[in-house]
Image (cartoon, rainbow, N blue to C red):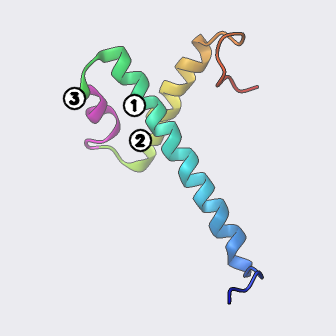
Amino acid sequence: MTSSSRGPGDAAAAQRLVEAITRRAALHEAIGVVQVWSGDQDDVLERFCDRRSDAEREAEVERVNAVVDAAAERRTDPDWDD
């Protein structure tokens, strides 16, 4: 039988999971963008994987996604954030 009660750490663990999934989705979005821009898999690996710390990778993800968001047209981009 499984208990329906949650421990105090469950909410924090769930929040960490949501944040990790959000970061991963942003990374994959940025990788897709760079693949289209460059057409070169090596460029993508260099930008996001090779010789990069987590902080450098996240900064590059934010930069790429900001460029895309700046160029997006609100009427035609379903992913546009308000």
Q: Give the range drawn in magenta.
A: 43-51
State whether the magenta stretch is mostly helix, strand or loop: helix
Residue nearest the observer in this picture, 41 or 67: 41
* Mark 1 to mark 3 CA distance (whole Å): 11 Å
| Viewer-side label of 1, 2 | 1
Residue 75, how many percent across, how many down?
72, 10
Mark before the other along the chain sequence, 1 or 2: 1
* Mark 1 to mark 2 CA distance (whole Å): 14 Å
Question: Could you tell me which secondary element the residue under label 1 belongs to?
Answer: helix
Q: Which amino acid does label 2 sit on?
A: Glu
Rendered residue at 26%/43% (across/down): 51
Pointer 1: what residue? Answer: 31
Rendered residue at 28%/17% (across/down): 39
> Which residue extends farthest bottom?
1
**From the viewer's perspective, is residue 21 above or below residue 70?**
below
Q: What residue type is labelled 1?
A: Ile
Pointer 3: what residue? Answer: 42
Residue 5, how many percent across, how many down?
77, 82
Q: Does the magenta stretch include residue 27?
A: no
Q: What residue type is labelled 3?
A: Asp
Question: Could you tell me which secondary element the residue under label 3 belongs to?
Answer: helix
Mark before the other along the chain sequence, 2 or 3: 3
Rendered residue at 68%/86% (across/down): 2
Rendered residue at 68%/68% (across/down): 12
Q: How crowded is mark 1: few (under 14 residues within 10 Å), some or many (20 or more)?
A: many
Residue 61, how many percent across, how many down?
47, 34
The picture quadrant where one finds residue 81 is: top right
Pointer 2: what residue? Answer: 56
Q: Are marks 2 and 3 in contact (CB under 8 Å)?
A: no
Question: Could you tell me which secondary element the residue under label 2 belongs to?
Answer: helix
Q: Residues within 10 Å of mark 3 (few under 14, many from 20)?
A: few
**In the image, is 74 to the left or to the right of 45?**
right
